Image (cartoon, helix red, strand yellow):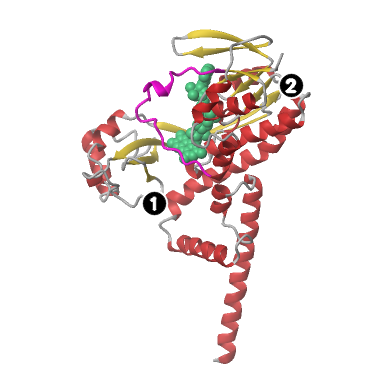
Amino acid sequence: MPTKFVLIGSGLAGGLLAAYLGRRGYDVDLYERRVDPREGNIVGGRSINLAVSTRGIHALEQLGIAVDLTEAVAYLEAPSVEAAVSAANPQPQIIKARGDAIIGVDGAFSAVRQSMQKKIEKFDYDESYLAHGYKELTIPPGPDGSWQMEKEALHIWPRKSFMMIALPNPDGSFTCTLFWEFEGPRSFKTTKTDEDVRRFFDEEFPDAVPLMPMLLDDFRQNPTGSLVTIRCAPWYYHDKVALVGDAAHAVVPFYGQGMNAAFEDCVVLDDCLEKFPDNRERAFVEYFSRRKENADALADLAVENFIEMRDKTASRVFRAKKKLDHLLEGLLPGIYLPLYTMVTFTRIPYAAAARRARRQDRIVYVSLIAIMSILAISILLFR
Ligand SMILES: Cc1cc2nc3c(=O)[nH]c(=O)nc-3n(C[C@H](O)[C@H](O)[C@H](O)COP(=O)(O)OP(=O)(O)OC[C@H]3O[C@@H](n4cnc5c(N)ncnc54)[C@H](O)[C@@H]3O)c2cc1C
């Protein structure tokens, strides 16, 4: 009998992992508590548009499903026996499933992880929330169906302690996300009436307001989401349980990498299962040791990028540094790689990318200081 994996959660990583495991010949049962979005039941204001980058595309390409994710369905099978799990669905109803191993792909508030916390005595767990929440808003297409702003761009309205961003959609609209403090004199909490909302937007985003005819409805109706970073260890329990994706390492969304990292987990776990086909615990151990440092590095990078986006993108020094980054990248191709390039457009492990960026920055700053000192000395000597 082939090994049976029970996957709890069919979000972004669950479907992909099912496809990887199915391809390797394992039996897979996939449990999801929400209704199938293909049946048209998308929760309003939670339809976030996701940037898939090199790591995510690689994971999809390995399966030849870069275009069609529903392919995972082809690998799913009926339940069989061994380790057991209960997953609540919204009715609420307890479903009992059995398999040789359970994979928690059930997101940031993972029930599988909570079970591991109870079971493993020295389970490390840390969750930290930003003081900011987020709310989705919409810029609809123009009258002719075209984009009302540059479509080949991520638009950012940096406002020091908060910001709004807008990402283009294929239908000509933009999804805007306001990242703003939950509490404080000006915050989600104090902005209650339509008048408050209108005043805040007129003051802070006057250029965007004319493009947002549904602003007040969106603001009222769309939920305010929270932003959490979750770190835990270990991500496995013997050969019986493992965690993948946000269940193991939720990060704030400012590098656009949470899903990409979750997809990368699937590639690495698949690789480890191939390496240790007869020893699932060793496969889980190796998967954890290869991913943990990188997930931690990404968590730090994502928070740092929030500060960068909301606070520094308006600064001249910051923009000069970005231009220098691009210049050096052009002059030294393959040698100098800006951090953003490494994270988004390569598969260099996150931790290695962060270390390399710090090294590069040190070299650039030391070189700049040396050049400026030489210039200053030359001016003094030849005056
Ligand atoms: C505002 C925002 C913007 C983002 N933008 C990006 C981006 O541009 N690029 C990017 O790479 N990432 C982005 N992310 C991160 C990305 O959404 C997550 O990293 C990704 O969804 C993680 O996938 P997952 O499968 O691990 O978890 P999820 O996608 O959360 O899926 C978990 C699934 O498990 C199900 N589930 C939970 N509990 C149970 C249970 N007990 N029984 C059965 N099913 C259960 C849930 O219903 C859900 O479907 C963003 C996140 C946010 C909040």
Residue that appears at 58% across and 31% down: 245
**Label 2 belongs to which residue?**
238
Q: Which percent across, then down, holds residue 197?
A: 26, 38
Residue occupying image coordinates x 54% and y 48%? 344
- Say which residue label 1 marks: 152
Magenta residue span: 30-53
The outermost residue toward the bottom is 383
Disc 2 residue type (three-letter): His
User: Is 46 colored magenta in this rendering?
Assistant: yes
Q: What amino acid is found at the position of numbered circle 1 in the picture?
A: Glu
> Which quadrant of the figure contains the N terminus?
top right
Q: Which mark sits nearer the N-terminus, 2 or 1?
A: 1
Count neighbours of disc 1 (C-alpha within 10 A) and say few if under 14, some if 14 to 19, many if 20 or more. Answer: few
Q: Is residue 175 left or right of residue 18?
A: left
Q: Nearer the viewer, residue 16 or 356?
A: 16
Query: Image quadrant of residue 362?
Result: bottom right
Majority SS type along the magenta span: loop
Residue 348 location, x and y as percent? 64, 48
